[in-house]
Image (tube, helix red, strand yellow):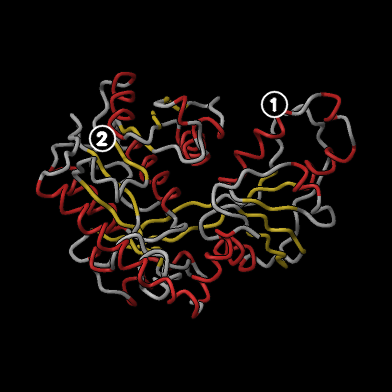
Amino acid sequence: MSIETIITNAWQRKAAWLWLLLPISWLYGLITLLRRHAYKVGLLSSYRAPIPVMVIGNISVGGSGKTPLIIALVNHLQKRGIKVGVISRGYGGDTSQMPALVNATSLPNVVGDEPCLIVHMTGVAMAVCPNRQQAITTLLDAEPDLQLIIADDGLQHYALKRDIEWIVVDAARGFGNEQLLPTGFLREPMSRLEGAHVIYHDKPKTDLSHYHESSKNSHPPERLSMHLQADELQHLWSPQSPIKQIDNVVPASNSRVHAVSGIGYPQRFFDTLESLGFDVIGHPYPDHYDFSLAELLQYSDYPIVVTSKDAVKIKALLSDYTAEQASSDEYAQLVSRLWVLPVTAVLSDNCYDNLNQQLKALGIEADSDVGTKTPS
């Protein structure tokens, strides 16, 4: 088990030994405060993009549902005729090849797994680079007619000025012991949420058709919320893979499965599968983990279910295998056991209402009669 996994588990359990790290958290908090103030007063310079920038981020370490939210927003904006692009630091990619544009043939080990997933799901124009200014320049050089740029996970990147800022909060996970790193899993203090545009990631309701009605009854009308809706299991088989396909049957909802996850908060994935009726054997890995097929081969007794983010990396692994390796029954059986559970971010109607107001204030007009509400 990696140190990252040990600390993540300790955060989830609110382990008592974490309080020994409190002096480090105080130092981290002081540095964070001074750094933000330096940008605010101009001691450190910030880049202003030539078009509006919307930052999507969180104040905590680990998954909050940010990537599905970005995918949902991009799809919404595209349907409304707004020309949107996305930038990301490209975590897990090869920084020596950045800045880089992301397209349908990009590899996760070059541009990162989340950018590959976002482009695969939306076809959006996207660029990656740790230097967000370089990413924006690269993106606009390729797509000069963009109207809006969404910055993935750039909340603490104060070197980039932003016109809209959405903070995603995992309401089900909460804030743990509410301490900064490393005592807790907060990147910034809770005060950062005051006056901010916060999207609360809630657990989905059992009856999704009444989600919005029940949300209005249980939360103040101004609360902005989203949840992740699980779609049907899909086979991970890639037509480009040289590994032969074996006929297989979708795992039944009451069957046992290996849930393999390398995302920021694997427990949410496990809980989702359990809510669908599966008997889950959970295998959490560190976020952005680089799987090997040898590791996956050990889960040979039951079907393997992975997240969409992990699937993009596993598909790349399958496509790398030679015809000789692919001909083995061992790998063919592995392919037959691999399944993906896609999820879709469902936003409350007032999220879209607020977005439309923010865009209008920036002079970005869209077709008012298209896609303004959450799909039913």
Q: Position of residue 344 (x, y in %)?
A: 49, 51
Q: Position of residue 134 (x, y in %)?
A: 31, 28
Q: Around disc 1, counting alpha carbons within 10 Å, would you say few (fewer than 14), some (14 to 19), or many (20 or more)?
A: few
Label 2 belongs to which residue? 148
Q: Position of residue 48 (x, y in %)?
A: 17, 35
Label 1 belongs to which residue? 240
Q: Position of residue 194 (x, y in %)?
A: 20, 66
Q: Nearer the viewer, residue 351 or 175?
A: 175
Extreme residue in the bottom direction? 16
Extreme residue in the right direction? 329
Extreme residue in the left direction? 41
Look at label 1 and name its amino acid: Gln
SS of the residue under disc 2: strand
Q: Nearer the viewer, residue 168 or 29?
A: 29
Q: Is residue 261 left or right of residue 239?
A: left
Which residue does the image show at 9% across and 49% down from the upper left?
Answer: 41
Q: Is residue 374 left or right of residue 189?
A: right
SS of the residue under disc 1: loop
In the rendered view, tell whether residue 220 sits above or below residue 136. Answer: below
Look at label 2 and name its amino acid: Leu
Q: Is residue 18 left or right of residue 327?
A: left
Q: Around disc 2, counting alpha carbons within 10 Å, would you say few (fewer than 14), some (14 to 19), or many (20 or more)?
A: many
Screen quadrant of the C terminus:
bottom left
Screen quadrant of the N terminus:
bottom right
Q: How many marks?
A: 2
The answer to whether mark 1 and mark 2 are in CB contact below 8 A is: no
Q: Nearer the viewer, residue 165 or 89?
A: 89
Which residue does the image show at 55% across and 56% down from the upper left?
Answer: 230
